[in-house]
Image: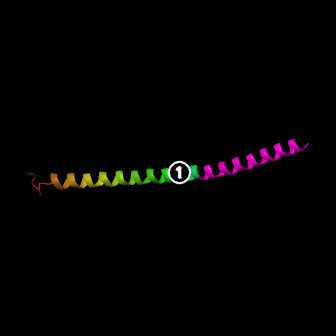
Amino acid sequence: MAPTFIIQTRIREAKEELTAEIRINTERVNQLTVLLRERQQYEQELDARQKNVVSVNNRYYSSGKVKLC
């Protein structure tokens, strides 16, 4: 009976280790998801700002107030 108990104990310990690692990895994946969503939002905001700058520049230079060389 002793070898069976030892094996069951090792299996239980391995399961606990695996469960702990899965929790850690799940937290990391969740954090990565949050960061990727934030990055996407920042990229969209930057794109909008850049389009606005281009639009303002186009209106400014096309107004005739500034001559390009």
Q: Is residue 15 above or below residue 56?
A: above
Q: Position of residue 67 (x, y in %)?
A: 9, 54
Left or right: where 8 falls relative to 48: right
Look at the image and say whether residue 32 sits in the magenta stretch: no
- How packed mark 1 is, by other alpha carbons closer than 10 Å (few <14, some 14-19, many 20 or more), is few
| Secondary structure mostly seen in the magenta stretch | helix
Mark 1 residue type:
Leu
Q: Position of residue 11 (x, y in %)?
A: 78, 44
Left or right: where 41 falls relative to 32: left
Left or right: where 7 falls relative to 42: right
Q: Residue at x 86, y 42 (%)?
A: 3
Residue marked by disc 1: 32
Nearest the viewer among 69 and 65 is 69
Q: Position of residue 60 (x, y in %)?
A: 18, 56
State the extent of the magenta-drawn residues as a range: 1-27
Nearest the viewer among 63 and 23 is 23
